[in-house]
Image (cartoon, coloured by chain):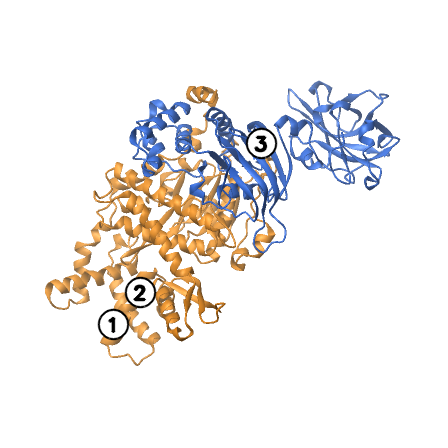
């Protein structure tokens, strides 16, 4: 059993007053694939490096399999940093390339062979075990490198942006492979990335972190369907969620001349600090074109359309008081435009004004003051 | 890198930035035109076949030099009178490594010199190609595998390890965490009877204001594992002398590193009447090749003892002295040997009273230059003049011992060129082997991987299911 627990963990770099990781509480369950995701400088790599023993922990403690490792040296923690730039050795067989570290550690020969064979089976390299790297394809060589980490049978795998030095094609392929591999092996894994697509496609659970503070932890669908705050809402999902601030009048969001009904329990949570305004978010796929007189719809001036064959995208400016509102209330960052996904057969003409209806069940509402979820 | 971290770093390193690498290069914003970001411009750079994958560049623009093992495609390319090393790699990684190498250069550390990052490459058909990181080929340097392809002194592995330990300590002193220390990721220059190691791959590295013990320990542990692996590999290829114990060599790195790190950073404690011991400590550090910038001294709480810790600035004590005297820019041990010869010259010409600067000028004209001019043309790209000079001095000493009397310099040079110099030649077959080996670790060669589709690969499909 190798559950990883961060307990009130804080890291302040010498000379800084702000912590790089602030009072982090997080547990990675035994065998779980947890992805830590966030923008540059958010503290995600610092978190991984603390678990690896490369960074000191100023406050709190870290446990692996119930054992406090907070001050333990990296090599005593039984972790493997996967996918560092493992070089393959040209004169060694695939089996030796995978098993040599065990040999150094003094593992008995037959045990090495056993572990190597097991790893080779998982990596589909069995028939190549006695060959040299030269005889392998690029992808097979990559898998041999993974094998080097697997045969060690560590308690925890740590992966820090492991795909960043692969080109786009290899990245997608390797992403699938790592995820499949981790599930087969069932080794507790902490994976760090800035790429939310990687996070959504690979993780059992995702932890979103920003400026050293944990924002939300949950399954990919939880984060996608019920983001806890404005940051997570805008960060998870591609194309990202449309997020705008609107005045609330008589329990309804006012968008130009139009109004959108809001659930009462959300409006009731607004406080004086919110200044009678609300952050309204919706994903491009949760809206549709509406008829001219339909209620609960707002006007959008179409700036551009995209026909992707299976999907169509409308990019436009929300009309407020008949003038195109450029950015004053816009929180999402898609060239300051609102994005709506429709059938490519429904795409309007550029320059037209259309009515957009938001699926009320898929609306995301946040406080303007706290940026926390209201519904 | 965040601003707070930058503010605590050596200002020289901070100013080195010229390429700001983005964490998240937005695909839509990637320039579609070829773009060369360089610290200095060499117009010849624009004439290279950037539109081709590096593995397909024409032979006539490549320099046939031994390459080390790499996961990426690497080639040596003639650009005007220079030879550049080109590494094909993703844009974000190329920009990051370029920036890191620039910072390390500003800190005067032994690394390869970054020249440029080339992005926005496309084939004539419009297919995107990876970025290329360009560094200057370190003249006379060799990857460790090339050193093992020749008839070697039995202690070569150990001397390489000693050089690598010095490099690691120097990098760690300035706060550089390497993340992937290995013989493959360094280049070696002969330095008199030792080697000098240079950092060549900074892909996994990171510059911090200072390192934690965990970061240093991780580097040490990984270095040990990698070195043992590399030697085991040489052994599998029958390239390692039979009596070399791979694990013992790996352990030697750990031991050398720790003793050097201790000598440079430990706090000494003296009685106030033992201040001469401080001088002893400084001398010892100079002997190791390190300059002491200042001494941090404070009185222990009991008031009876003085605690002293040296602030080491830099290695290269002797080489800086020689550079000042003669303008020769050579490695540390070579400099020591040359300085010794300069001293001997000064004594033998009865000029102890004269300024060393003036004696040095005459020594250059009368001794050093005439000797190195005798390097045969075919070896001029293979042996550094200072190394040639050093080896002749050594050879001359052995000849004199054997003959029982002094040997004139001219005779020593001739004998050396005839008997010793030929071992410097790396023959064609060995070069071919080394470069084929280097290629067999590449995982992302577009040319062999370009049309790869995991859906068509029965192995991958079975495996990922």
Front-most of B38 and B171? B171
User: Which one is closest to the eye, mark 1 or mark 3?
Assistant: 3
Report whether mark 2 lies on the same chain as mark 3: no
Q: Up-down: is A182 above or below B244?
A: above
Number of residue marks: 3
Residue in view at x 60 percent, y 47 percent: A20
Assign a secondary structure to mark 3. Answer: helix
Residue annotated with mark 3 = A199
Mark closer to the chain start, 2 or 1 = 2
Left or right: A99 in relation to B311: left
Q: Residues within 10 Å of mark 3 (few under 14, many from 20)?
A: many
Assign a secondary structure to mark 2. Answer: helix
Q: Position of residue A186 (x, y in %)?
A: 48, 26
Q: Position of residue B23 (x, y in %)?
A: 57, 42
Front-most of B18 and A283? A283
Q: Can residue B265 be seen at all in this image of the molecule?
A: yes
Task: Measure how far apart labels 2 and 3 are at the Cα level.
Answer: 56 Å
Residue annotated with mark 2 = B336
User: Chain coloured orange: which letter?
Assistant: B
Residue annotated with mark 1 = B344
Q: Chain of mark 2?
A: B
Left or right: A84 in relation to B344: right
Specify the colour of chain A.
blue
Mark 2–mark 3 contact, CB under 8 Å?
A: no
């Amino acid at each position: 059993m190798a559950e990883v627990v961060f307990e009130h963990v804080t890291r302040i770099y010498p000379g800084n007053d702000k912590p790089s990781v602030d009072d982090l509480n997080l547990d990675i369950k035994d065998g779980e694939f947890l992805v830590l995701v966030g923008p540059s400088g958010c503290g995600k790599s610092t978190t991984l490096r603390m678990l690896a023993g490369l960074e000191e922990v100023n406050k709190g403690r870290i446990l692996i399999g119930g054992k406090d490792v907070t001050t333990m040296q990296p090599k005593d923690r039984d972790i493997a940093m996967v996918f560092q730039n493992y070089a393959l050795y040209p004169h060694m067989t695939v089996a030796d390339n995978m098993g040599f570290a065990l040999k150094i550690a003094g593992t008995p020969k037959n045990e090495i062979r056993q572990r190597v064979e097991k790893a080779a089976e998982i990596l589909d390299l069995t028939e190549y075990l006695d060959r040299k790297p030269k005889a392998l394809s690029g992808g097979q060589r990559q898998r041999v490198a993974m094998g080097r980490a697997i045969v060690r049978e560590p308690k925890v795998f740590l992966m820090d942006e492991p795909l960043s030095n692969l080109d786009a094609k290899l990245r997608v392929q390797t992403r699938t492979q790592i995820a499949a591999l981790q599930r087969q092996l069932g080794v507790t894994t902490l994976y760090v990335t800035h790429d939310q697509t990687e996070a959504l496609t690979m993780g059992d659970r995702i932890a979103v972190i920003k400026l050293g503070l944990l924002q939300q932890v949950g399954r990919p669908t939880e984060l996608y369907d019920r983001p806890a705050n404005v940051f997570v809402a805008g960060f998870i999902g591609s194309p990202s969620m449309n997020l705008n601030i609107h005045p609330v009048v008589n329990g309804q969001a006012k968008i130009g001349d139009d109004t959108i009904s809001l659930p009462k329990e959300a409006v009731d949570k607004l406080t004086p600090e919110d200044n009678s305004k609300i952050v309204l978010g919706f994903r491009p796929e949760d809206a549709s074109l509406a008829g001219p007189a339909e209620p609960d719809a707002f006007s959008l001036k179409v700036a551009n359309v995209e026909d992707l064959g299976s999907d169509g995208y409308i990019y436009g400016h929300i009309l407020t008081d008949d003038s195109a509102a450029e950015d004053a209330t816009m929180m999402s960052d898609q060239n300051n435009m609102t994005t709506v996904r429709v059938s490519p057969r429904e795409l309007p003409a550029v320059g037209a004004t259309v009515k957009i209806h938001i699926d009320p069940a898929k609306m995301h509402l946040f406080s303007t003051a706290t940026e926390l979820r209201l519904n | 890198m965040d601003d707070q971290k930058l503010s605590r770093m050596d200002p020289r390193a901070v100013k080195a930035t010229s390429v700001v690498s983005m964490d998240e290069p937005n695909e839509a914003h990637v320039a579609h035109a070829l773009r060369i970001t360089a610290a200095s411009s060499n117009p010849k750079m624009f004439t290279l076949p950037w539109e081709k994958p590096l593995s397909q560049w024409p032979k006539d623009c490549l320099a046939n030099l031994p390459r080390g093992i790499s996961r990426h495609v690497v080639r040596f390319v003639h650009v005007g009178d220079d030879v550049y090393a080109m590494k094909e790699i993703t844009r974000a990684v190329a920009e990051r490594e370029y920036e890191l190498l620039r910072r390390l250069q500003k800190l005067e550390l032994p690394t390869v010199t970054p020249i440029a990052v080339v992005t926005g490459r496309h084939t004539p058909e419009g297919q995107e190609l990876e970025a290329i990181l360009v560094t200057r080929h370190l003249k006379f340097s060799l990857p460790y595998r090339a050193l093992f392809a020749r008839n070697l002194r039995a202690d070569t592995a150990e001397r390489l390890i000693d050089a690598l330990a010095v490099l690691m300590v120097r990098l760690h002193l300035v706060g550089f965490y390497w993340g992937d220390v290995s013989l493959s990721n360094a280049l070696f220059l002969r330095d008199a009877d030792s080697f000098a190691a240079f950092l060549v791959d900074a892909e996994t590295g990171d510059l911090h204001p200072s390192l934690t013990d965990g970061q240093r320990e991780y580097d040490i542990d990984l270095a040990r594992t990698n070195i043992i692996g590399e030697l085991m590999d040489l052994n599998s290829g029958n390239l390692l002398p039979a009596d070399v114990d791979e694990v013992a060599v790996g352990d030697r790195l750990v031991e050398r590193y720790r003793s050097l790190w201790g000598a440079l950073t430990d706090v000494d404690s003296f009685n106030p009447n033992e201040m001469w011991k401080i001088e002893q400590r400084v001398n010892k550090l100079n002997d190791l090749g390190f300059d002491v910038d200042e001494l941090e001294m404070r009185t222990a709480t009991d008031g009876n003892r003085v605690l002293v810790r040296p602030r080491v600035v830099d290695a290269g004590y002797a080489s800086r002295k020689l550079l000042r005297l003669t303008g020769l820019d050579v490695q540390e041990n070579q400099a020591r040997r040359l300085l010794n010869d300069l001293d001997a010259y000064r004594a033998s010409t009865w000029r102890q009273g004269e300024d060393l600067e003036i004696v040095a000028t005459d020594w250059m004209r009368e001794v050093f230059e005439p000797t190195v001019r005798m390097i045969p043309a075919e070896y001029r790209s293979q042996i550094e003049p200072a190394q040639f000079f050093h080896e002749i001095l050594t050879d001359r000493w052995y000849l004199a011992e054997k003959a029982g009397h002094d040997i004139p310099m001219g005779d020593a040079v001739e004998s050396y060129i005839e008997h010793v110099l030929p071992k410097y030649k790396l023959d064609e077959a060995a070069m071919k082997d080394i470069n084929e080996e280097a290629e067999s670790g590449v995982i992302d060669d577009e040319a062999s991987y370009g049309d790869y589709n995991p859906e068509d690969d029965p192995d991958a499909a079975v495996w990922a299911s």
